[in-house]
Image (tube, rainbow, N blue to C red):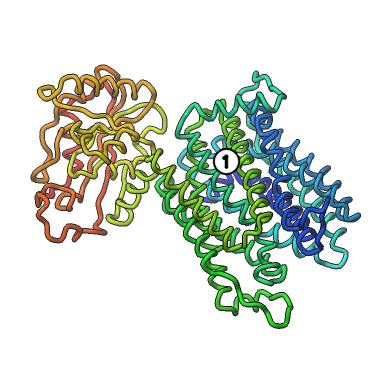
Amino acid sequence: MSIHTFRARGFWPFFYTQFCGAFNDNVFKNAIGILIAYKAYSIGGISPEQMVSLSGGIFILPFFLFSAIAGQMADKYSKPKLIRFVKALEIAIMIMGMIGFIHENLTLLLVALFLMGLHSTLFGPVKYSILPHLLQSDELITGNAYVETGTFIAILLGSILGVQLITMQGGALITGTAVILIAVIGFLVSLSIKHIAPVFPELKINLNPLTTSIEIMGITRRVDSIFNSILGISWFWFIGIALLSIIPVYCKDFLHARESVVTLFLVLFSVGIGVGSILCERLSFKRTELGLVPIGSFGLSLFTFDLFLAGQPMAISSGELMTVADFLSTHYGIRISLDVFLLSVSGGFFTVPLYTFIQQRSQKEIRSRVIAGNNISNAFFMVVSSLFLAALYHFKYSYPQIFLIFSIMNALVAIYIYTIIPEFMLRFMAWSLTNILYRLKVTGRENLPLEGPFVIACNHVTFIDGLVIASGCPRPARFVMYYKYFDMPFMSRIFKDSKVIPIAGAHEDPAVMNAAFDKIAAELEDGEVVCIFPEGKLTHDGTMHEFRPGIEKIIERTPVPVVPACLNGLWGSYFSKKYRGNERRPFKRKWSRISLEFGAPIPPEEVSTERLFEVIRTMKVDES
């Protein structure tokens, strides 16, 4: 998507406003973190390591307490007006922070940190719920990639600036002045965000945090796929907040490195998230690709585990802390740096598809509250993560041991999630199939309605046609499949959890056939997409077989448009019946180009087996 298009839709004023907010958060947070870690600031005898961890929890706590109220406000009031109110509040908080820095008053700084968390809590539901108002549906994955990249670049620059400013001569005054200036710039930029009318102005706001949080979490559970995506994002932040909290003390006490190495790691982490987000946008081809999520989770475990394997670095004989040059000259420096970078790239792969999926699948009247529910869940996981990390410090676990614990925990959670929610793995299989084993070219995707029910009718070439179509279709589809495939023990569970509809011929099992038509009608009435193969069987010679009349029965019962689709290039592959499983080189056609074409939708009153057959036949390439 072009930069000009985003500018025309008013995306950039919002982008820079949220950039300034994330930038200021991290200047402030990291300045406090350096004061605690390197000047041993403490309250009540708490160790500096625990103070660093607990300060992260203090910033996150408002998300847990007030996200529900923030979500209601974002649905009730105009989002741009709410943003301006929040940015004005930020200026007042930063004035308090400046006083705390000048007087080196840790208590006042922590109060300001809590209030900055409140500021971010109020901004959070607006940040993601406003994007569908500024962008088209097929632009959301790009918009989210830009926002995630911008956010982590802001984290990077803010982290660097926070460390550099607070360690300068007169750093307290300089840092306090900087955070006020950044807040003012953010407010001024927010004035350019275009007007957006409230989506639910009659909503009555419940100011009770407990009852409102329970209500909003109930809203997030209405759609299982949305709730599961929220849990996935929350788990990422459980891991991420712990790793970010570890960095300052890990560098000082374990790597024996200066603040500049802390900055290096924050650079790698932020740039990695940005690179992962952009790669995700490129590999998704402007659609929400949940198949990239398992790649991200695998990378999180793999590179965290390698941080454990890197082990204890050698002590520096001079007793001085290492500079960046010293660190990168060691045998372990580059390895640890690569682990941090690739771990964060994996994070970009993990989060961008999930955020986009939540935005697309949430109804606009409740979208802000769904985002607020996501923030509540994230905050809960992050607070628990901070407490868990503090407990690991208390029981004297070493830093490699902590990395190992998080790596194993992430692997176990990933296995559990992908076992109970096979959609992620199915999407991963579909993405891998059409981007690694084959090279899929999709044309006519603009013919697929972005909303409302419709039927995809496609020729049937191989056993993997459903995976290819799932990869090429931006919306999830309910596939109609021959019922005897459900007899396979392992695949049966996957088919059921993926809401595949089993069907049988009228002469085989009339009850199964009637149940299939009932289920198809129910899915279409719910606004879903259904995909059928009108031939009713795989081709044996590469040509199309006569279409069965089932499609006409479906449309007669539930009149919806039918999108004709055609697969080309798969005949002769291992998954087709050309060789009947006797091909000695089953994957000799790997990396070959295949294509999926979607034709113009046919109105329900014009649907017939004869017309569908002729339309798809004209799209078919002779492969016999």
Quadrant in which residue 200 is drawn: top right
Q: Position of residue 374 (x, y in %)?
A: 58, 37
Pick whichever, 585 or 547, lies toward us: 585
Q: Is residue 543 left or right of residue 139?
A: left
Pick whichever, 339 or 398, lies toward us: 398
* Element class at badge 1: loop
Q: Position of residue 91 (x, y in %)?
A: 81, 44
Q: Position of residue 358 (x, y in %)?
A: 51, 37
Q: Residue placed at 71% from the left, 38% from the top? A: 62
Q: Is residue 159 left or right of residue 529?
A: right
> Is 421 drawn above or below residue 54 in the view shown?
above
Q: Is residue 316 left or right of residue 411?
A: right
Q: Residue placed at 77% from the left, 56% from the top? A: 47
Q: Residue furthest front?
A: 395
Quadrant in which residue 596 is drawn: top left
Q: Residue placed at 72% from the left, 75% from the top? A: 321
Callout 1 environment at 10 Å: few (<14), some (14 to 19), or many (20+)? Answer: some
Q: Which residue is mark 1?
A: 9
> Is 575 drawn above or below residue 519 in the view shown?
below
